[in-house]
Image (cartoon, rainbow, N blue to C red):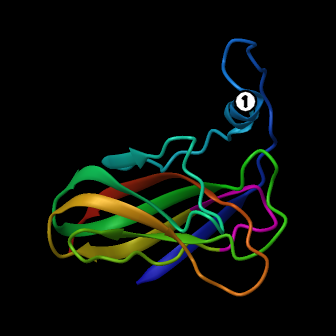
């Protein structure tokens, strides 16, 4: 398995709408980067409320229809409107079919990142995905998984 990591520094920009919700929701929505999981056939986008930190180690399960097969898996991650100041800002996902993804690269010190994992084999059909924060020593910041993308490949 090989992994390719692309780090993107993304400038926070946007305008807040007075009727859009509480201030923290406005800050999140107005500064969320426009990252996607590439040109993947199957994309799972996570809600803005999904945050992995010391208090929330996992989120999900989320429903998905993912046939068994070989995939290029892409992830997009954001540190949030307050940025990332620590290290170990990594996550991974598991499926109900027993697959465990590689861990995303540590996004610190940039605000957002895209990871691509080639040659991933999902041996059985998947109906649910759960995302998890990587347990590690050091300063742990919050991390916002934005999406997962699955592009089928030939075996």
Q: Residue at x 24, y 68 (%)?
A: 96
The C terminus: image quadrant: bottom left
Q: Position of residue 142 (x, y in %)?
A: 69, 61
Q: Is residue 16 above or below residue 150?
A: above
In the rendered structure, the answer to whether residue 70 lies left or right of residue 52 reads left
Q: Residue at x 38, y 48 (%)?
A: 44
Q: Position of residue 127 (x, y in %)?
A: 20, 57
In the rendered structure, the answer to whether residue 10 lies left or right of residue 99 reads right
Front position in the image: 154 or 141: 141
Q: Residues within 10 Å of mark 1 (few under 14, many from 20)?
A: some
* Residue segment shown in magenta: 106-114
Residue occupied by mark 1: 30
Front position in the image: 127 or 69: 127
Q: Residue furthest bottom?
A: 137
Q: Quadrant of residue 149?
A: bottom left
Q: Residue at x 37, y 50 (%)?
A: 40
């Amino acid at each position: 398995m090989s992994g390719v990591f692309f780090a993107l520094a993304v400038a926070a920009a946007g305008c807040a709408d007075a009727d859009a919700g509480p201030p923290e929701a406005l800050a999140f929505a107005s500064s969320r980067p426009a990252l996607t999981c590439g040109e993947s056939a199957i994309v799972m986008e996570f809600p803005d409320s999904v945050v992995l930190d010391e208090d929330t180690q996992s989120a999900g399960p989320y429903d998905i229809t993912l046939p068994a097969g070989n995939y290029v898996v892409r992830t997009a991650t954001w540190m949030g409107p307050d940025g990332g100041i620590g290290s170990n800002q990594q996550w991974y996902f598991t499926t109900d079919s027993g697959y465990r993804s590689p861990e995303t690269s540590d996004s610190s010190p940039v605000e957002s990142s895209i990871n691509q994992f080639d040659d991933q084999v999902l041996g059985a059909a998947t109906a649910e995905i759960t995302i998890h924060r990587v347990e590690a020593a050091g300063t742990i910041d919050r991390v916002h998984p934005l999406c997962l993308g699955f592009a089928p490949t030939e075996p």
